[in-house]
Amino acid sequence: MIVRSSEINGPVHESADVCIIGSGCGGGASAKVLAEAGKKVIVLEEGGYYTSKDFDATEQTAYQHLYQQRAGQATDDLAVTVLQGRCVGGSSTVNWTTSLRTPDFVLEAWKRDHGIQGFSPKELDPYFEKVEQYLNIHTEPFENHNPNNRLILDGAKKLGFRASAVGRNTKDCVKAGACGLGCPFDAKKTVAITYIPDAVKRGATVFANFRATKVEVTRTTKRVSGVVFDHQTQKPKTDFIIEAPIVIVSASAINSPVLLLKSNLANNSGELGKNLTFHLTSAVLGVFDQIMYGAGGIPQSAMSDEFLNKNHDGGGFWLEAVPIYPTLAALALPEFGSMHRELLHQYPHIGATIILVKEIDSNGRVTVNDHGRASISYTLRDKDLGYLKQGVGVAARVQFAAGAKRVITLHARLTEFNSPEEIGNKLAVSNWGMNEIGLYSAHPLGTCRMGSDPKRSVVDEHCQTHDVNGLFVIDGSVTPTSLGVNPQVTILAIAEKSAEWIAGNFADIKAR
Amino acid sequence: MKAFHDRRTTRRKFLKESLFGVAFLSASKLIPTEVLLAGELSQVPKDLVFFSPREYLIFEAVAERIIGLPSPGQPSVKEVGVSSRADQFLAGADPEVQDQLHQLFTVFNAAFFTFLFDFRFCSFLNMSATDKDSYIRDWMTSKFGFRRTGFQALKRVSLSMFYTDSRSWKEIGFEGMFMPEDRK
């Protein structure tokens, strides 16, 4: 069953075989596997429980109810906006459906550099296949791409760059464009309408608006305590305690380390909260003669991976499209006042291409601030900055090749190109410092990284913390490197694999 | 051109740098801001939950310059209620963010700081529209990281409060998203 906080009238004290903190890709898939294995599972979700009937496809409703910090989450200096879901289903409720396997070269680096066994492409293959089948992951035929995605396919092709359709986890998609706002048609196969209901069918209980604030480890069990929030006012309503021999933290690369740091657990390595990667993202906005209407149609269905690991250094960048909702566009556009407003008057004619950098030398850190919340810092270093600059230039060229009349970057000060010839010189004199260029992340990873060496990593290859038996972390925080692709399939596959191991070794883990 | 990491400013550093200025706040209090704004203060909503009355006026003045003047027949910042919406929105923000914003409004408006940063001996609220734009631009392009962060904070709150409101959509040609027939 799924329990909303409105149904809670007093302190909650429950016990289970497994308590899972977080209901996104990591938590949701783990819940399904473990419930199907006959375990009594309790899932705690900080955000609310919503169905497609609650989604009105407006930014106001979506940001208010479905996103972390109402879509205002950012690094402490506001240089990087960090978009994450905060509801049953987590980020899968608000992502743009792109579903891709972890690249082989990334998995090879995990084995080579972090000693991780069991994660070769061949060994992960059955888990990827299972996820792809379960979520109906498929690519779209050419006629289904909206103008904003076609420009990547057309522009890249003209320049001789590799580009293709991406996998999407949808069924009977009506191309409404609201993926990032909660799908009102239930066409997107989110965790909230797939893994979670299947887990519930097998007896799992999901508590919504339950924020875990501490995990305690005793000799015989583990105790997760926290606060129940009123669904409407977001004010604390009562407390809860869940006891279970196995606890899985699946609260994301931002909030999993916060919970563990506050609980003084799993940090003998000193690596907890470190090694944050963002899949750092910026964009270029092309102004076209024709109507692009980037808010409509399938928001993300094509990509160009021509420059990912092109230099065989594990880095590089990738191009994708992005839905152009009004507020998202207003926040991304440069300048302010009349100049900003004039740029927004071009709204229906704007096509947006995002550049996602697979970091190799940049990283960040999540710590706990004085109020017990996440404090996020990030340092962009030279190699990745180089790829970011190159990516902005390439994306602008792709836009021109697809027919853009002018192309604007996300620099705070208006930086625009009226022809491809202007790109190089103008980018060379642009400022790339903090808050001088708009930067985003929807793929924070790595803060509880996996590895074979307990001195350099937080969890082992089963996602169990090196320090505490029966305490697991299963979410994007365990990836030891940036992925270079959208992470939901990777996280789901890791969850399927780890939860399967937990189910198969439950008695041993419990007895230890 | 400096690399990103050379200019990195953490929130703690932002606080520290700003506190340097806050030490001089007593000097800024010598400026008769309350007297100058007495008429306007009386128009501030009484049920504010985040802003002080003065902060409300500062934010509204900033939002009007950041969002820009509407095309004829389109809603203004006041008509959309941007400041009241921001008041409600910020009341739910992380407590640390709230502390920072209160500090930002003091530093942003006080004549002492406008002089310190830009050699203008005039509070933001008392500047002409042209000077306000120029002053905001100075924050946007400042060599001090905390001022650029401050600009971003003001820009984000202003624009998100305006463009999440459906009354702002017509001017930019957004017609709303496609919805199921029975829920249009």
Image: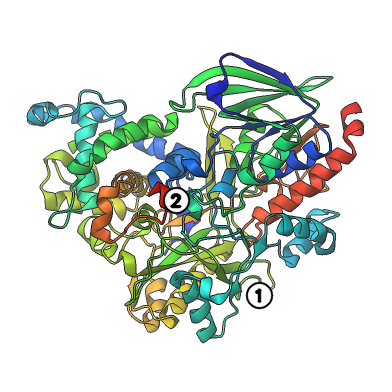
Task: Indicate the quadrant containing the C terminus of chain A: top left, top right, bottom left or bottom right.
Answer: top right
As rendered, which of A401 and A169 lies closer to the eye? A169
Secondary-structure class at tag 1: loop
Q: Residue at x 67, y 59 (%)?
A: A136
Q: Chain of mark 2?
A: A
Q: Is residue A16 visible?
A: yes
Q: Position of residue A6 (x, y in %)?
A: 52, 23
Colour setup of the view: rainbow
Around disc 1, counting alpha carbons within 10 Å, would you say few (fewer than 14), some (14 to 19), or many (20 or more)? few
Q: Name the image quarter holding residue A251.
A: top right
Q: Amino acid at mark 2?
A: Ala
Q: Residue at x 25, y 56 (%)?
A: B170
Q: Position of residue B34 (x, y in %)?
A: 13, 27
Q: Position of residue A248 (x, y in %)?
A: 73, 35
On residue A79, the disc is 2
Disc nearer the start of the sequence (1/2) = 2
Name of the residue lying farthest toward the front = B182
User: Could you give the CA–CA distance between mark 1 and mark 2, rounded to whole angstroms?
Assistant: 28 Å
| Residue B3 in the figure: left or right of residue B58 | right
Residue at mark 1: A311
Q: Position of residue A361 (x, y in %)?
A: 62, 59
Q: Is residue A448 visible?
A: no
Q: Name the image quarter holding residue A200.
A: top right
